[in-house]
Amino acid sequence: MLYICLVHFDDKEVFSRLSDAEKRELDIASTGYDRELERSGNLVRAQALQGPESAVLVRVRDGKISTTDGPFLETKEQLGGFILIEARDLNDAIRIAGGIPLAQHGTIEVRPIHRVPQYDGAA
Amino acid sequence: MTRPIDIDAVWRTESRRVLATLIRLLRDFDRAEEALNDAFLAAAEQWPRDGMPANPRAWLVSAGRFKAIDRLRRKARFDVVAAELALEEEAQMPPEAESIADDQLRLIFVCCHPEVPADARIAMTLRETCGLMTEEIAAAFLAKPTAIAQRIVRAKTRIRELQLPYEVPEPEQLSERLDAVLRTIYLIFNEGYAASHGDTLLRADLAAEAIRLGRLLVALLPDPDSEVEGLLSLMLLQHSRRDARTDAAGDLVLIADQDRRLWDRAEIAEGVTLVNRLMARPELTAYGIEAAIAAQHAIAAAPEATNWAEIVRLYDLLLRADASPIVMLNRAVAIAMRDGPEVGLSEMEAIRERGALSAFRYLHAARADLLRQLGRTEEARAAYVAALELTHQAAERRFIEGRLAELSAPSTPRP
């Protein structure tokens, strides 16, 4: 079963609170955990994201494209990265999410992957 | 040179036992689950190349343990706790073979520990000892996977925080602790057997899992236990009727109307053998007596051949062990079969006057049935309506609605 772990955290708060050495440790732990997941066969793809101020929001209405600066919602915790995993079941996915180092600073949203139905005749 | 190796088949037969041992060795559910995955990953790599080890289970346990130590060592670079744990793990003795069978028992007892919330015991037992996925458990109980998942997480947190011991209880506590285990198994069975709501897909599997757990307990407990054997035989005898309980349309068929050729003879034989062994012992247990009642139905070649006098006698015994209104109701039904509907009804009215079962649909349905047999149509109709209002399971609703329709059609008397 595929699950995505969406890593939300308040980057300004976390990065202002941690010392440079602690930030470095967090980075090492995060890439180290990705490697663990690769070793255990759970990792499909892990990616960190640039900050929410780098986001552009795109909409198409009546055939017209419009863009605005992100982020979409004014919540403190923003999407900062994701890990797509293969897990046995939801509790296995929760266990894996609990090991993500940033879970100690932010919130991990675990969601099962939805399989979009395939329709005959689609290209 | 080597046979093709079916890792999935090994997973099905060994993963729960290996997990049970890894939980003891690593003293943590999550680290054990991680180690179990690692061990099977290593097996998938090595076995096709090197051949299947002579003792796959021992190989998996030892691989899982070493993988867990490896992980702790790698983590130890930035985690003091992990560093300590790694040292502690390495100092541990490797598992002794004879304690591995006990690990499955330990796992069942910790999943059904009285300190684990009752609603989580079922989910924990099904996931950890039966290997069901969270999503499968949720589907079987018509619950949201997120609800079941959180129940399991909270249960594991509680086990960790209270440091619940991973052990088979000492003899003086065994009976009390076993009671919680048996209740959990019977709830799993009943959810599969007499689904209280919704449709029946997947639920047969729950009944089969409960029987598997019952067999496991009988096989693993150091001394024969009458409660455990009683529950196992009760489940086997009830389960033997599963194919006859509903018709092609999924409607409920009462035991008197069932096609007895559809009953599972092997399960009946196993259940009756256990019952005979239990009835020969001096002390009788509630599950054992219930199993003896089920056996009376199972051995009757036809409904008319049912020994109702013996069944009433067994209910009298059961009342001494379990004086619940539900037992009294079942006894009243048996008395009606032995002495006629009038006598049965007066027994039932006595239960009704106590008010204990007014929200219990079977009281109204059983009473309605006797009133119908006595030709007291209006009272029967009111009782069926009361039963219908309390019934949410589709097949049971259709059954009661069918009886109500018969009451309205004057020319279709039933025996």
Image (cartoon, rainbow, N blue to C red):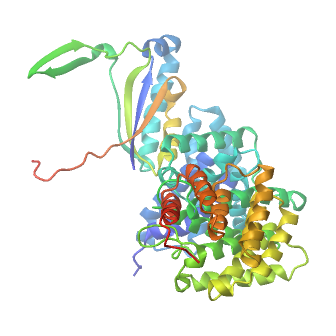
Give the side of residue B349 with respect to residue A116, left or right.
right
Quadrant, the N terminus of chain B:
bottom left
Q: Position of residue B198 (x, y in %)?
A: 48, 54
Tell me which corner region of the image, top left, top right, bottom left or bottom right, holds residue B78: top right
**Which one is in front, B201 or B364?**
B364
Tell me which corner region of the image, top left, top right, bottom left or bottom right, holds residue B15: bottom right
Tell me which corner region of the image, top left, top right, bottom left or bottom right, holds residue B288: bottom right
Give the side of residue B1 with respect to residue B148, left or right.
left
Q: Position of residue B354 (x, y in %)?
A: 81, 51
Q: Position of residue B336 (x, y in %)?
A: 73, 72
Give the side of residue B162 with respect to residue B237, left or right.
right
Against B97, residue B271 (above or below) is below
Give the number of callouts: 0
Quadrant, the C terminus of chain B:
bottom right
Q: Position of residue A123 (x, y in %)?
A: 9, 47
Against B241, residue B146 (above or below) is above
Give the residue displayed 80% in from the left and 83% down from the top. B277
Give the side of residue A34 with respect to residue B85, left or right.
left
**Which one is in front, B62 or B167?**
B167
**Residue B413 seen in the figure:** yes
Give the residue displayed 65% in from the left and 82% down from the top. B298
**Which one is in front, B51 or B390?**
B390
**Which one is in front, B274 or B80?**
B274
Against B358, residue B5 (above or below) is below
Give the residue displayed 76% in from the left and 67% down from the top. B332
**Residue B98 seen in the figure:** no
Give the residue displayed 38% in from the left and 24% down from the top. A80
